[in-house]
Image (spheres, rainbow, N blue to C red):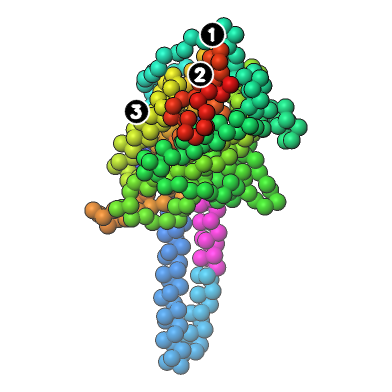
Amino acid sequence: MIELTYIRSQPEEVKQRLSIKNFKEVFLIDEVIAIDIERRNIQKSLDDVLAQSNELATTVGKLFKEGKTTEAEEIKKQSVLLKENSNQYKLQLEEVEKKQFDILVKLPNTPSFEVPLGKTPEENEVVKQVGTIPVLFAGAKPHWEIAADKELFDLEMGVKITGAGFPLYKGNGARLQRALINFFLDEAIAAGYTEYVPPFMVNADSAFATGQLPDKEGQMYEMPVDGFYMIPTAEVPITNIYRNVIVKEKDFPIKMTAHSPCFRREAGSYGKDVRGLNRVHQFEKIEIVVVEHPEKSYETLQSMVHHVENLLLKLDLPYRILKLCGGDMGFASAMTYDFEVYSTAQERWLEVSSVSNFETFQSNRLKLRFKDEATGKTRLAHTLNGSALALPRIYAALLENHQTAEGIRIPEALRKYTGFDVLS
């Protein structure tokens, strides 16, 4: 949520930044400011009435002590009227604050001025492209056909057990999945991230704090009886560890990682581009999350990008890094880099990671603060997260790009986890 102090002090800059995201309702900034003026006027009136009430209470106490009961009772009548007025102001204040809050939660995060202009994914900026796209042998197949031949995962059984988009991994296919999870976790731990095993369900407060509510409720699986949501990513529970917390400045950066299943409805996902593991409702992912000092968050963003890049290099997959344009960015992000790997059998790029800086957008909702040692003031921290990595499309790219006539060549970095060099 955008800081109200920022909107109040620099409304035109807020509008300018929101325009980078092609946000059409910039007039809401003026509404927020108008409501804020109204709110502060009501607050002043309430404060004045409460101050008068306190003065009268002191006077009444003195009069009773002096035995001036009649005068005291007359003044008490004035106190009753003031109390009625204060109750009215409190109701007005509550109503105005709700109106202001309802607008603030509709506003996406303000993007960095370094975010490229653009409306569609085609206008994202390609930062770099690495690796040679392999030339496959005659008879090479897409990953869903490889999986069927080698009995690695079963989509039809997933339909029987649950429904479309819930794959069942088995045998060496399950082993490959576990190998990727352990590899990604070990790499994150080696990079200084502390591992967590979080709950896989969260309450509405947690989902709101990281920006899933009210923006993405249609993509989440909800259990209304309990008021819980299945997590779309481990970002949600592990970031919420620091909800309503004041951290120490010396503890920055706070680096966390977690493996979890992720659950997303992905409404409207049909057609050839979502075959196999290209788009599923349940998948595994290793998430990295950092709570950082505001002056260092963009430096940390680059280190997180480097971490993800190193994983893809070790998996020997051709990849490219995109800096997302304003129109393709997420609701809560201030800047996002996407990673895509090339699927040779499908002849297209597949997104496998997003690494984002949210600046104070999440921490404002989380009430995640730190005490600035230089000024003594309490400030909002910055939060960042990234996929390191999401498994389905990595798994698909490994099968497709490393296939040979003898079997699937396992990258050297994974072999100690799989226990085999070739998946035959």
Measure the C-alpha gap from mark 1 to mark 3. Answer: 42 Å
- Give the dominant element type of the magenta stretch: helix, strand or loop: helix
Q: Secondary structure at mark 3?
A: loop
Q: Which residue has dot 3 on it?
A: 114
Residue 299 location (% of width, % of height)? 31, 36
Residue 28 counted in the magenta span: no
Q: Secondary structure at mark 2?
A: loop
Q: Earlier in the sequence, mark 1 or mark 3?
A: 3
Looking at the image, is 171 positioned above or below residue 194?
above
Circle 2: is it few (<14), some (14-19), or many (20+) Cα within 10 Å?
A: many
Residue 92, which numbered label? none
Looking at the image, is 289 positioned above or below residue 135?
below
Q: Which residue has dot 1 on it?
A: 137
Q: Which residue has dot 2 on it?
A: 402
Q: Which residues are magenta?
A: 84-98
Residue 67 location (% of width, % of height)? 46, 93
- The residue that appears at 51% across and 21% down in the rendered structure is 409
Figure quadrant of residue 275: top right
Q: Secondary structure at mark 1?
A: loop
Residue 95 counted in the magenta span: yes
Q: Residue furthest bottom?
A: 67
Badge 2 amino acid: His
Measure the C-alpha gap from mark 3 to mark 2. Answer: 36 Å
Badge 1 amino acid: Phe
